[in-house]
Image (cartoon, rainbow, N blue to C red):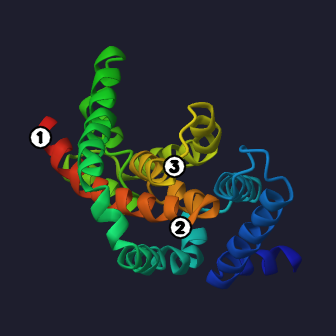
Amino acid sequence: MSEGLWVYLSTSPLLWLSGTLFVWIVAIGIARALPANPLLNPVLLSVSAIVCLLSVFHIRYESYFAGAQFIHFLLGPATVALGIPLYEKLFLVRANLLPMVVALFAGSLTAVATTLFLGHVFAFDQTVIASLAPKSATAAVAMAISSGLHGDPALTAAVVIMTGVCGAVIVTPLMNAMKIRDYSARGFAVGLASHGIGTARAYSVDPVAGLFSGLAMGLNAIATSLIVHLFL
């Protein structure tokens, strides 16, 4: 009877919606308890925990996403909400317009070019290259670009998450080591390289860093779509 009950619950959207929220709350608690450890990133902890749960209990991803899709839907409104601090600090954005444009195209071009170079060195096929090239754009845009280039959107999504987590983990120690104190520069760099996950980290460090990170994330989505199609 208990096995039958578990089979029923495992296919219920409410179970995995609640489970995802619970795992996230626990991950946030761990990250706040040990803020000095950059590896304890809430997204990294959450993804690792959910992957382990799905693997141990042999839960199909489709069953899990039936509940998690409600959280996935909120990515759109959350991204649009980033426009509010942008409006409030518009004068600061205007003052840094030229450096942002230069950094945008340099960063976007580097992200795509390095992928193409590594693909050539390791002899990746065209599908893999098309899947990896938009890795620094936000997930929805990257998956659309990948699909349009006949890549694998699922592989793209996985690489985008890895890119975001890596950026969120190393951004603060790296910027401190490079003695970069300007939070507008720090935020723009992490948003350019690590999209939404990096932006969440930037907001937790400083509001100005979060503002410029969100701006970089949006602009990089446009720039990446143009540059990737130009190269591929």
Q: Nearer the viewer, residue 212 or 141?
A: 212
The secondary structure type at the circle numbered 2 is: helix
Residue 144 lies in what quarter of the image? bottom left
Q: Is residue 69 left or right of residue 79?
A: right
Residue 5 lies in what quarter of the image? bottom right
Q: Residue at x 20, y 53 (%)?
A: 148
In the rendered structure, which disc, 3 or 1, sits on the residue that comes first in sequence? 3
Please state the horizontal and vertical placement of residue 219, each as a whole percent of the image: 28, 58
Which residue type carries mark 1? Leu
Please tell me how crowded label 3 is: few (under 14), some (14-19), or many (20+) other residues with Cα within 10 Å.
Answer: many
Which residue type carries mark 3? Gly
The secondary structure type at the circle numbered 1 is: helix
Please tell me whether residue 136 is drawn above or below residue 84 in the rendered image.
above
What quarter of the picture does the N terminus occupy?
A: bottom right
Please tell me whether residue 127 is drawn above or below residue 118 in the rendered image.
below
Q: Is residue 144 in view?
A: no
Disc 2 from disc 1: Cα separation: 34 Å
Q: Is residue 30 in view?
A: yes
Q: Is residue 83 left or right of residue 61?
A: left
Q: Identify the residue under disc 2.
A: 62
Q: Residue at x 24, y 32 (%)?
A: 126
Please tell me how crowded label 1 is: few (under 14), some (14-19), or many (20+) other residues with Cα within 10 Å.
Answer: few
Disc 3 from disc 1: Cα separation: 24 Å
Q: Give the total of numbered labels.
A: 3
Q: Residue furthest top?
A: 121
Q: Identify the residue under disc 1.
A: 230
Please tell me whether residue 198 is drawn above or below residue 111 in the rendered image.
below
Please state the horizontal and vertical placement of residue 145, each as a whole percent of the image: 25, 53
